[in-house]
Image: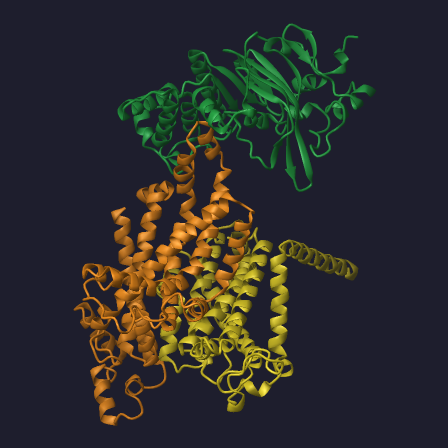
Chain colours: A orange, B green, C yellow
Amino acid sequence: MAKYIALRLGQSIFVLFGLSLLIFFIARVVPGDPARVALGNLATEEQVQKLRAEMHLDRPFAVQYYYWLKSMLRGDLGKSLYTQRPVTTDLRQYIPATLELILFATLISLVFGQVTGVLAGYFRNSWFDNLSRLASYLGVATPSFVVAILLLFIFSQLLKLAPSVGRLPLMVKAPPTVTGFMIIDSLLAGRPDLTLLALKHLVLPAFSLAVIHIAQEGRITRSSLIENVQKDYIIAHEVHGIRPTKLVFKYLLKPSIIPTVTVMGLDFAFLMSNAFLVELVFFWPGFARYAVNAMLSKDLNAIVAVVLVIGVTFALVNLVVDTIITFLDPAIRIQRRGG
Amino acid sequence: MGMTSLLEIRGLHVGFKIFDGLLKVLAGVELAIGEGERVGLVGETGCGKTTTVKSVLRVLPIPPARLDGGEILYRAQDILKMKPREVRHLRRTELTAIFQDPLQALNPVFTVGTQLRDIVLDSLAAAGQRLTRKEITARCVQALAETGMPDPERIMSNYPIQLSGGMRQRVCIAEALIKSAKLLLADEPTTNLDVTIQDQILRKLDELVEEKGMSVLMITHSLGVVMDLTERVYIMYAGTIVEEGRTEELFARPLHPYTQGLMKSVPKLTGEGISKGIAGRIPNYLEPPSGCRFHPRCEHAMPICEEERPPLFSTGVNRRVACFLYQRS
Amino acid sequence: MIAEHGVRIWAALARRRRGLAKGWYKYSRNSLSVLGLVVLVLIGLTAGLAPYIAPYPEHAAAYTNFREAGLPPSKDHLFGTDRVGRDVLSRVIFGYRFSLLLGIVVLSLAVPSGVVLGLLGGYYNGTWIEVLIMRITDVFLAVPPLVLAMSIAAMLTPNLFNAMIAISLSWWPWYCRLVYSVTASLRNQFFVREAELTGASRMHILFKEILPNCFGPIMTKVTLDMGIAILMGASLSFIGLGAQPPTPDLGTMLADGAKRLPSEWWSTIFPALAIVMVILAFNLVGDGLRDVFAVEEV
């Protein structure tokens, strides 16, 4: 198992190098001067030349990449042209907000998705099952930014049930940053009132992200439950007198949850991409919004960093998902141990 | 038939609702098993053997299945009318079963040990007993060893995919016999195994059942198996019992035209391919033949066969046949 | 001789027609898929005939009429007007044009390149060609497609055409991987070996023997992906990395309209529903095709 993880990590590092190379390559072959674009039309030729030298744009591509790689390995991702600060500082500031949002959305989609799936599977072909089928069709076809706009419009603007934008109201002073998670930081600062406020701000964006996954994961769990319920081994467990709670929550749920876990890696990828749009709608001061601004201002160092951070996260998530699957499915575990 | 029947099925009718209509699969099954008796149930694939077993175990999927009458008495209590709790108690203490396909009958994501232990735990709970974890494990290992499983301690921590078909069936037997039940329903327990392993496993099963003094209903389409392992036998055709009797006697002198055809079609050595000897096929359950369900294929069919269902006529001690040829006026 | 040939052709045609009839039978069993197809045809017609159907075709471009700005839905403007007085319905109709165009361009760039690379990778299984192609594919698959498309679009000049390029560049690896897995599994099948032994050319083996076996999965994926490609296009425009105003792109309209919520809801809600409808239609049709090709699916 350890060997397998090491192999996977090795592959991921290789792939991430490839990814950084790809981005640099595209930046280089695209017509136009990145330095000129970054500084705008008002900058003088000298300023542009200075930036070109700073970014090693005046040297061959290989040299430019070598310099970037060298400083990257020292933990320096360069300066952001958009914020005029080191990219790593920016990342440290913005990542926790996005992480909080994504993790909360994952939690929501897991809980609601599994509950929906189990209920729809249990009450098969009932009105609940049909409703959840309809919702899954709609959920999959509705872009998360459309969901975000609709939720914002209905719950925040029409019904005034939830705050509309940001992580906390403008007038409220944020608790000192410890973890970067507003919910935890406010608790650490001894301000449960702020936790509640932060949660209220979190609910709509997180739901906008989660809706698709609630729908999809629910359907997957449902169909695998229905498939497994008719299996001989479940009938055998029943005949051997296994009590119903153990039958459902141990012997039925474990084999049924495997397909849902399998798609979780891809789901997380979708959550990350959709965070870009949802953060825009809700003015969420997170990593994705930072990334969008960096992209709009063609901030090469920031773009490369953003892509790499997402690549690393994606690789780690896939590794975790794979490990969970290995833990759940002995067939895969045995195959990996053997091969 | 012994005076004290452990299990008695009376006039069992079971149908399956499908899109095209109602499949009338079981049409008045009559069957009894005495205490300590080993009984065979023989018929072609699709004749309703498995449906009968599933009805007794109360695991028919309802719907699409539906009960259209009859009763299944276990120690004079109707299983079909029991509450789920009572059925569960029965499964933990009295009834047990082995299924056709050992590849499908074991949960793929739990170890053999986990699956065995949980059965012991729940059957102990039903009996009001308590054992330590160690004692339970010892009991599971013993149950595996009894089936002739090599290295049972190691098997406990194995997953089903790590075992061969024969070994899996041994695990299934251990699961079925670990809770000291009184009646074993064995639904073609060796059909999907190699011929050599089939024989080994059946012998082992026979030995264990003998030892524990259990009653057995052995469901099979193999006449050889029935001849070796049972005292009494029922022949089933298209959801009805057509003939019953002591095994030796029935084999020596089959009465029902279907049974006669069945015997003729057995190649002397292998015991395969029983349907070759009789013209035609098992009827369509959507619109089964009127009267005797066998009459369209029967050489001796009479006008009455088309109009009336033949009841089981008694032709001797423990000997009955559902055919008008044997009707005594 | 000629007659015999004619009979053969006729038989082949009849066989194909029976195949189609059977396919349609499988497809039409799911009434939602049929509904999806109807909606899709309607959307296609609307987009194709946009200049004749749209009540105010000139509003699809840079047009301003501040006297009619922000009007709620009425008889003259069924979907209302936007903040510079353009008819939202007309812009939605033209928006479909750009959406479908984007989907078609993206897939006709991404699918052939992905398919050819996948065929090569699968056929030269175990050689450096496979390693090279599949490792490059891995690099492209290392980040979610939307993120990759956004980064590429960011480095190009933001406009609709570059958005198409960016999405295509992040899309081909999925087809490459799909076709690769089918091809690799067919590589050692009898019919491929036989063709090799009889001296058939590589081109013949790849495109005549192997490719037809990938047809089912590709068709299904293409239909489902049309919806996703349109979604990605709209996402890029929404962020500002795709189509630029005054192009009547559904994503741009949404970004624009969202600023006017909740008062001028119509300039957001109608484009939003339009996006949902086109993606839903493609998904339903894709589901139906999956049923048709169910046997061949890998």
Q: How many marks?
A: 0
Work out whether residue A262 can be spotted. Answer: no
**Image x and y of residue C142, in percent:** 35, 63
Image height of C32 relative to B182, above or below: below
Farthest residue toward the left?
Answer: A74
Toward the viewer: A72 or C80? C80
Instruction: Quadrant for residue B125, please give it.
Output: top left
Task: Please give the name of the residue rendered at 25% of the width and 48% of the height, measured from the top-left corner.
Answer: A2
Left-right relation of B79 to B152: right
Q: Is residue B8 above or below residue C207?
A: above
Residue at (38%, 53%) from the top-left corner? Answer: A110
Q: Which of C187/B318 is in front? A: B318
Most extreme residue toward the right, as rendered? B303
Q: Quadrant of residue B77?
A: top right
Give the image location of residue C174, x and y in percent: 44, 63
On-image quarter of the C terminus of chain B: top right
Of the pair B7 and A315, the residue shown nearer to us: B7
Image quadrant where one finds the N terminus of chain B? top right
Query: Residue B278 location, x and y as percent?
Result: 71, 24
Residue at image coords 36%, 81%: A30
Q: Position of residue A137 (x, y in %)?
A: 52, 59
When the figure is inspected, residue A263 is found, relative to residue B270, above or below; the finding is below
